[in-house]
Image (tube, helix red, strand yellow):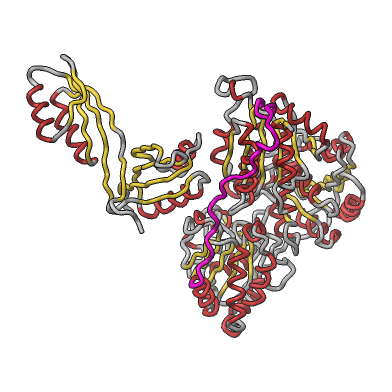
Amino acid sequence: MKAKENTIALLVRNRPDVLARIAGTFSGGGFNIESITANITKTPETTKIIITTKGSASTMEKLKKQLNRLVDVLSVDDLTGRMASRRELVLFRMKWSDETRPAVMAAVDLYNWKVVCMDDRYCVIEVSGRKDSIDRAIQLLDPLGLEDFSRSGMVALEKFKPE
Amino acid sequence: MKLTGSQVLLRTLRRENVDVIFGYPGGVVLPIYDELYKEEFRHLLVRHEQGAIHAADGYARASGKVGVCLVTSGPGATNTVTGIANAYMDSIPVVIFTGQVPTGLIGSDAFQEVDITGITRPCTKHNFLVRRIEDLASTIHEAFHIARSGRPGPVLVDLPRDVSQATIEEEDIRDDFNTLNGLEKPQQEDIAKAVEMIRAARKPVIVSGGGVLLGKASEELREFVRRTGFPITSTLMGLGAYPGSDPLWLGMPGMHGTYYANMAITGCDLLVAVGMRFDDRVTSKVDAFAPDAQIIHIDIDPVSIDRIVRSHLSIVSDAKTALGLLNAALAAGGPVPVERTREWMEQIDAWKKRVPLRFSEETDRIKPQQVIRKLYELTKGEALIATEVGQNQMWAAQYYTYDHPHTFISSGGLGTMGFGFPAAVGAQVACPDKTVVDIAGDGSIQMNIQELATAVQYNIPVKIVILNNQYLGMVRQWQQMFYGRRYSHTDMSYAPDFVKIAEAYGATGLRASRPEELEAVLKKGLETPGVVVMDIRVEKEECVYPMVRPGASIADMELGVELPADKAAPTNGGEDPQTRSFN
């Protein structure tokens, strides 16, 4: 079966090695984590973790069951194919030169990106959006002096509260 | 009143009704051992930490309670890892307490420090590192709860030395913890659907597993068989849940299963799997396992459902609840029609007659199967049998008849050599009034033979029957079958004199070398008080049959004997088994 990208939202107890257990469940089952984000929720005792991973529907079923078995995992929510907002945040460090500066600034204006800081040699641009628009931003900025970037991995939130 | 962490530990263990700890002291657990000295808690000093965890495991299997072991940090902790993995694979509830260096030194590569929670993460149901004395009691209660609830399993609690030395006011001790979500009840429509499938079946078979024993559902299973009249087979882990002397009993299926169990599974149109997880030793080639059957899978662990064999109806439940509901539904709807399955039962009977479990008795050499049969006769089937791993284990599963639950103790999933004897010690501690026999191989027994000292010191009268073939028998069998008889490094003929070993430890040692000596030696061994080692010199190159080659269909068995012609019986799926003999 074809492997597609899946988005899994986990609600976990905020205990020291919960992330290691989750990572171990992936590695032990032969799954790869494409991206992972984690932070506390409204209640500081729990953490929400969003993981994107590739796999067929049947392997995802197995993975979800195994994650559900972990003592510190409170819920496993599969957002794949559901109505959810999906966003990534990226910070790009660009080299400034007289040739590239106008094009970079034009792109920043055009796409409503944000310049976070700059000096006479570098600037840092903040971009957020869906995975494909982040990929396109990288393609666009690469020839314009892209030196390095940090990519957050996906956060996702279901658009409507599940019944 | 102020209590130390060590005192809190013992107080909490008492509240969990722990009556015995298998352990081994060391530097960082000295505060706990000092408390044990003062309080005279029942503690058995093993001779190797692997012995402690296997004994706790055997205790849990025999008693149905949670087994407990206590070891020190570093090597003490790592020595338990094999036993933890063993308990994990077989879903046995044990709680392992490991000492840890003081919290301030964690991560500094201190003397005898290992990250044991990191090491055991993949082979425990859950584990804890207790960093504050305030969390100690609640963590221990949670550990016991996790170990015994749902699908049971081992839970490790790592105790830094400063936590066991710290003090806390008694009224500040918290015993509560957040309980985990309970299991869902089986859906009534699933039960109704199952009953419909059961009533429609013409060629049914039941496969029960270790989950029936863990769920204490033997009574419900027996009632289920009574109500349906279906033939029943059980995995290695489930032996004893259904009486082996019953006419509906088919023996064990799988790699070393009986001819008739494997043929029944291959030919059935309905397979009811209860508390079993379709291990590859049971299914072998998955595509050819019950190929024509509708499958009902009852298991407490959703992970087991559809993982290996896709079921047509799955019920996520403990065996006791699910079988109880099925029995009630069957009772309400009147008896299951026997005419429907009559032809099938005749077919099974024909298979049983055609290829019974058998071996050729000889006059000049003791056959290992004969030892097990004789042991069964002498103990009247009432002994509690522990096994090591390998040929001895398979013969013990095939040739002893288990009529009672919790009487067969064996390492199923992990196949741990060295398990049987310490597990037998634990089982004997749990059941002091029972005859406990460890059926061993000469290879396996040497893996934890040092526990003879434990058994003798505490007068735990385990009887060890060594099927001594001077080989690593099962590996040798594979070399014989699949590697052109190249017996690479499986020759164990350089071995200690087991009789003298027994005597050196203060046990009784006996030996039988010829068939005419067998009965007298077994009888004397069983009757002699205390620990007895019986060195039985058996046929060296005997093989375990039937055998399914790895990856073959379970209907494709090598029987080790000529298959009698049986034109009359219809062949239900699967080709005729191999008839090659390797003897």
Say if the magenta span includes residue B183.
Answer: yes
Residue B303 screen position, x and y as percent: 50, 54
Q: Nearer the viewer, residue B346 or B53?
A: B53
Q: Is residue B466 left or right of residue A147?
A: right
Q: Residue furthest top?
A: A120
- Residue closest to the eye, B271 or B166: B166
Magenta extent: B161-189
* Residue B564 place in picture, x, y as percent: 65, 70
- Quarter of the image for residue A111 reads top left
Looking at the image, is B179 positioned above or below residue B31?
A: below
Q: Residue at x 59, y 53 (%)?
A: B151
Answer left or right for B181 relative to B219.
left
* Picture residue at 86% right of the left edge, 40% below the top: B458
Can residue B492 be seen at all in this image of the molecule? no
A120 over B269 or under it: above or below = above
Using the rendered view, name the quadrant where residue A151 is placed: top left
